[in-house]
Image (cartoon, helix red, strand yellow):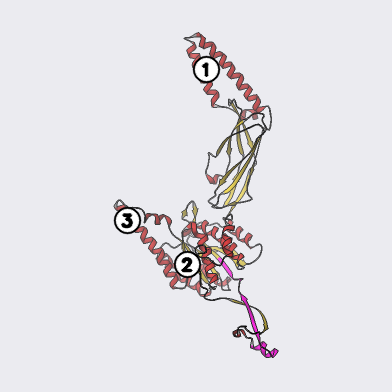
Amino acid sequence: MKHFYNTLFINNRFFYFLGGIAVLFVVGFFISIFFQIAKVLLFILSVLTIVDIFILYAKKDALTASRVLPERLSNGDANKIALELKNLYKFSTHLSIIEEIPYQFQKRDFIFSLILQNTEEKIIYYDLTPTERGVYLFGNTNIYASSPLQLATKKYVLGKEKELKCYPSFLKLRAFDFKAFTNQSLSYGTKKIRRIGHSLEFEQIKEYVSGDDIRSLNWKATAKRNQLMLNQYVEEKSQPVYSVIDKGRAMQMHFNNLSLLDYAINATLAISSVILRKQDKAGMLSFSTKLEDWVVAEKRNSQMSLISEALHNIKTDFSESDFSTLYAVVKRKITHRSLLILYTNFETMDGLNRQLPYLRALGKNHLVLVVFFENTELNSLTTIKTEDILEVYDSIIAEKFMYEKKSIVKELKKYGIQSVLTKPENLTGDTINKYLELKSRGLF
């Protein structure tokens, strides 16, 4: 009886009819024929309501629903969810479906309305786009079913609760992996890059044949064998590349609902995949007041899983970043010359100058690539038509900040530090392009 009480609802249509009958009763005090009509209609409404309730509850499990979820959610991407429904009633059923999606999406009116014919099956697809990493709890699927009479409704609570972890964006990996198989990298493969040097790795000593480069002659081996011998080299591929993620307060700013930190995390996952496909060693670390989430640069089958798990677990309170700690730990732990892709953000020259000594020190032993962000909201202020003095001030200040960003690029270049100034939404593509450019030029 308790279940019946908790799942039965009377529809608005019933109250509309009841209200109309009440009006007829009032009129019936003055015209007796309407009083008799009202009593007949009230009897018919009562019978139809009882019949409606009976046919809704006659079959115990007349509706089935199952939610098809991915194994994990991709942060910042549209994740496809499917809801499979089946109607076992012997009549067409009006359904209102309320999905209990995770609270992080802040949607309390996630409702679908549809009609299912007798024994009809249907699949409803919808997309969810998470904007933060973590654990997402999916609740039940609540279905409110009505017969064609639509006087009463029965509530079904179907499905099971399930937790899904939200990982850095992995749905776009294939699109970015395509860049690893092209020799043209900048601007999506439209700019040719002249190779100015190369790194070589020793392979073997072999006999000299006509046409070989005499600069590679091995004189010790030649003396032992009494014939010309030379060293054979192959292009060095397995070079370490570290993604260094700044977790400080400079990365707290949000664009399009994603923080700069999450943009950097998504880009790290994508570029790590490209690095491994280019036969280099991918690693990562994060820092603010101390270094954390360290994954040593390796080229192994499980490397992407290790990096993905480390990125998923990154937590921060957005405190002030300590670049001196970064320098000290990197100098002690990364002894082989590596490419360090540093994701951070500098808004002013003063902000850069405070950290520049540490970046220059890192650049003595490694190739440093600093990736920081354009403020796209400020960019829009410089393009709008100004109509009053306040808008003129806003436009001038925005242009000043944009000029500071470009000055930062020039200052870094002056000390031999590579840089990428990019919009948050273009971060992954621009960083991959820069990595491929540096690799094609043999700079590391």
* Residue 173, x across and y down, in percent: 58, 58
Q: Earlier in the sequence, mark 1 or mark 2?
A: 1
* Residue 293, x across and y down, in percent: 58, 62
Residue occupying image coordinates x 64% and y 86%: 218
Q: Nearer the viewer, residue 107 or 326?
A: 107
The quarter of the rendered structure image containing the N terminus is: top right
Real-space CA distance between mark 2 and mark 3, rounded to the nearest whole angstrom:
30 Å
Left/right placement of residue 164 relative to residue 401 reads right
The quarter of the rendered structure image containing the C terminus is: bottom right
Name which residue type carries label 3: Tyr
Does dot 1 land on a helix, a strand or a loop? helix
Real-space CA distance between mark 1 and mark 2, rounded to the nearest whole angstrom:
77 Å
Quadrant in the picture for residue 217: bottom right
Any magenta on residue 237?
A: yes
Residue indicated by mark 1: 21
Real-space CA distance between mark 3 and mark 1, rounded to the nearest whole angstrom:
67 Å
Quadrant in the picture for residue 352: bottom left
Q: Earlier in the sequence, mark 3 or mark 1?
A: 1
Q: Nearer the viewer, residue 434 or 243?
A: 434
Name which residue type carries label 1: Ile
Highlighted range, magenta: 219-242
Does dot 3 land on a helix, a strand or a loop? helix
Q: Are marks 3 and 1 in contact (CB under 8 Å)?
A: no
Q: Is residue 44 visible?
A: yes
Residue indicated by mark 2: 419
The numbered dot on residue 393 is 3
Name which residue type carries label 2: Ser
* Residue 356, x across and y down, in percent: 45, 69
Residue occupying image coordinates x 36% and y 53%: 384
Other-residue count near label 1 (Cα within 10 Å), few / some / many at <14 / 14–19 / ≥20: many
